[in-house]
């Protein structure tokens, strides 16, 4: 099946996922995380991409971001990866591919899914049993969004600002999102399916709006033959030869 063309309209949040080739480690030392974040800061600003949340795991990354310029996300990631692969290969005396093909992504409906994506991304280290609390993991945006740590990479989304008038109120409300509120299995499956297939994550109205905006399909086609194919086949078979040729 041909891959859907990737779309990232200006102003629409995007969840980005990329993993190491054959699940290999892409971060082996603290300096690697620092290097990646440095290039992410530089090129997100250069290409007009607001980074709302992220998590750098040992063998993959997650980003939640919104492009302010056409083509910003692709240009940003191409530049970050070009510098980072060159750095990583030199650092560890290796050659060849580091990432597993092109990055995967999905468009995100703000009101329905955005804050769930924040939680999904920043809970990755907990889900992987690397830490017990998201605050213990230094290579995600949780300490910034929940605890007020300063960052030049993070640009809060308007929905984050809506959590409270003051920073301390927003941080408390954000921490409350994580306290005892585990994402249900269906929501996680929706996020992972949409991201892996490059679809839109939201309700039917959102998906229609995105398709009208971009002119491209952002919903998964049903597997198998089209509905009614058997009846059509039988109808054709029942027609006389001269009628079928008309």
Image: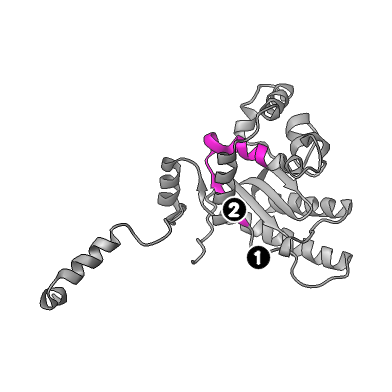
Residue at left offset 40%, top offset 61%: 224
- Foreground of the two, 190 or 207: 190
Residue 99 appears in which quarter of the rendering? bottom right
SS class of the residue under badge 1?
loop
The answer to if 11 sits in the magenta stretch is no
Q: Going by the image, does 204 lie left or right of 33?
A: left
Residue 160 place in picture, x, y as percent: 64, 31
| Residue range corresponding to the magenta coloring | 104-120
| Residue 67 can be seen in this image | no
**Residue under numbered circle 2:** 105
Considering the whole magenta stretch, tell me its main secondary structure: helix
Q: Is residue 31 above or below residue 144?
A: below
The answer to if 105 sits in the magenta stretch is yes
**Residue under numbered circle 1:** 101
Residue 122 place in picture, x, y as percent: 71, 40
Estimate how packed mark 1 is, as few (under 14), some (14 to 19) or many (20 or more) residues with alpha carbons within 10 Å.
few
């Amino acid at each position: 099946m041909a891959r859907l063309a990737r779309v990232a309209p200006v102003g629409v949040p995007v969840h980005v996922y990329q993993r190491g080739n054959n699940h290999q480690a892409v971060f082996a030392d603290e300096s690697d995380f620092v290097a990646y974040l440095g290039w992410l800061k530089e090129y997100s600003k250069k290409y007009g991409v607001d980074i709302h949340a992220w998590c750098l795991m040992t063998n993959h990354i997650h980003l939640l971001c919104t492009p302010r310029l056409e083509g910003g996300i692709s240009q940003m990631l191409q530049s970050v990866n070009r510098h980072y692969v060159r750095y990583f290969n030199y650092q560890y005396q290796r050659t060849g591919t580091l990432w597993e093909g092109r990055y995967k992504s999905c468009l995100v409906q703000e009101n329905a899914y955005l804050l769930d994506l924040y939680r999904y991304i920043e809970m990755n280290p907990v889900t992987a049993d690397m830490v017990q609390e998201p605050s213990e993991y230094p290579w995600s945006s949780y300490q910034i969004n929940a605890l007020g740590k300063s960052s030049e990479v993070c640009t809060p989304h308007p929905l984050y600002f809506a959590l409270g008038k003051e920073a301390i109120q927003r941080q408390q409300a954000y921490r409350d999102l994580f306290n005892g509120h585990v994402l249900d299995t269906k929501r996680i499956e929706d996020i992972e399916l949409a991201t892996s297939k490059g679809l839109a994550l939201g309700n039917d109205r959102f998906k229609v709006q995105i398709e009208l905006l971009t002119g491209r399909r952002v919903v998964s086609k049903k597997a198998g033959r089209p509905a009614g194919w058997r009846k059509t086949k039988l109808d054709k078979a029942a027609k006389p030869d001269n009628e079928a040729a008309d």
